Amino acid sequence: MEHGPPEHVRTAFGVREAVPRPRPDLPGPAWRCDSLVLRPVADTVLAAWSAGAIEELAAVGVDGLRLARPVRASDGRRVVAGWAASHDVAGRVEPRHDDVVAASLRLHRATARLERPRLVDDRDDLLARADRAAFGERTVPLDPETGGTLFGELARRRRALERPSQLVHGDLFGTVLFDPSDPGAPPAVLDLVPFWRPVEWAAAVVVIDALAWGGADPGILTRWAHLVQWPQMLLHALLFRLAVHAQHPSCTRESLQGLEHAARLVGSLLPPS
């Protein structure tokens, strides 16, 4: 892994002779090979679905966004030996939190045309369990010390969301790219992490992440307050992240502090329980 994609993977994607060069400005490990970027994927099924969905969106274009168009291997596969490839897109992750929220809303105007994939219902990974727990659809064992207690307290203030659900990217924070050499270039989206939830919820997840781990100012809460059922969207997003944190084996009491900060801010927007 430290040397990048092996030769047989580069051969499959048509860049055998390329010298892999790390792309440290991308989220997660990635290597540029000529005009392509190759990245290892943890979930082959998810990565293959994501590539297909991005291909479908790229075929018609997404207003105000660039998409990292996937590249298939010579035999048509989207994932080879745990690696996926896409055309390189300029940019890096930057703390432009409001711009990421705006990118989320633009992306989801486009994903509204996509059908609900079986993947959404079949998944039983940490994110899927946390999502269902946040919406009260499943009871999940949560470590009290790393978020379970706070989850229980906040869940009592949860109310049903009245907005329709559609396909949304539920993990955009820290993955949207901005090109510092071209400030006017649209943001770039690398892939999709699918959930079937309201558009406003996906935007709220970005805000919760930005408050908890991105150093966002509290004003980000009010700047997007025009979104429908915003306090409850934020609460559901916060419950989602708490459920992720309280299940994750590497999370600690110390790493919970960012979510506790977000909880204090979101709690001030909610009516008393």
Image (spheres, helix red, strand yellow):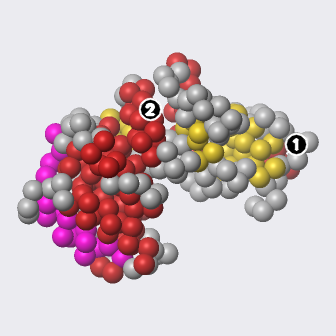
171 is higher (above) or lower (below) than 256: above
* Picture quadrant where residue 217 is located: bottom left
The residue singled out by tag 2 in the image is: 107
Q: How many marks?
A: 2
| Residue that badge 1 annotates | 18
Q: Considering depth in this image, is 28 or 24 the residue closer to the camera?
A: 24
Residue in the foreground of this view, choosing between 126 and 94: 94
Quarter placement of the N terminus: bottom right
Helix, strand or loop at mark 2: helix
Magenta segment includes 179? no
Q: Residue 154 lies in magenta, yes or no?
A: yes
Q: Position of residue 86 (x, y in %)?
A: 68, 37
Q: Amino acid at mark 1?
A: Ala
Task: Report the residue at 36% width, 44% height from top.
Answer: 202
Is residue 99 visible in this depiction of the protein?
yes
The x, y position of residue 110, in whole percent, is 42, 26
Could you tell me residue 31's position as x and y percent? Answer: 75, 49
In the drawing, does residue 115 fall left or right of residue 55? left
Residue at point 27% right, 51% down?
A: 234
Q: Residue furthest left?
A: 272
Pinpoint residue 268: horizontal percent, then vertical percent.
Answer: 18, 59
Q: Is residue 45 visible?
A: no
Q: Which residues are magenta?
A: 146-162
